Amino acid sequence: FLYKYIPLPHHIYNRPETLTPWASIAFHPLDGIAQASPYVWVAPFVPCHYLCHIGLIFFTAIWATYIHDSMDWNIDPIMGSKYHTVHHTHGKK
């Protein structure tokens, strides 16, 4: 039910020519809140320096851009753009 209204708008980028790094930030606001919430929920229970926390958020933003560039390569063991392009082009419609 919720898929149709929250994550589905991000998946309109379903062809390699529309799947660009800009697609990594083109999502519903509630989807963005759901993606960012683990950083907020975990912070009180897993102590780490605030620069480490900021670094993790920065790395996630770089990774999201990387997986949405529709290139045909991966950096194992991190999920790469090859798999994520398949996820967008052949995933649930």
Image (cartoon, rainbow, N blue to C red):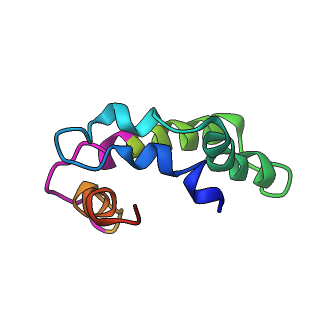
Is 74 colored magenta in this rendering?
Answer: yes
Where, by quadrant of the figure, is residue 83 drawn? bottom left
**Quadrant of the drawing holding the N terminus:** bottom right
Image side of residue 29 versus residue 59, left or right: right
**Residue visible at 35% across and 31% down in the picture:** 22
The foreground one among 91 and 56 is 91
The image shows residue 7 at horizontal and vertical percentages of: 54, 51
Tell me how many marks there are: 0
Q: Foreground: 31 or 44?
A: 31
- Horizontal side of 4 relative to 45 (left or right) equals left
Residue at point 22%, 48% (across, down): 15
Look at the picture and state if 2 lies above or below 59. below
Magenta residues?
65-76
Residue 67 in the magenta stretch? The answer is yes
Q: Which residue is pictured at 37% across the width and 45% down the height?
A: 12
Residue 14: x percent and y percent? Answer: 29, 50
Q: Quadrant of residue 80?
A: bottom left
Q: Residue 35 appears at what percent x and percent y?
A: 62, 48
Q: Is residue 38 left or right of residue 27?
A: right
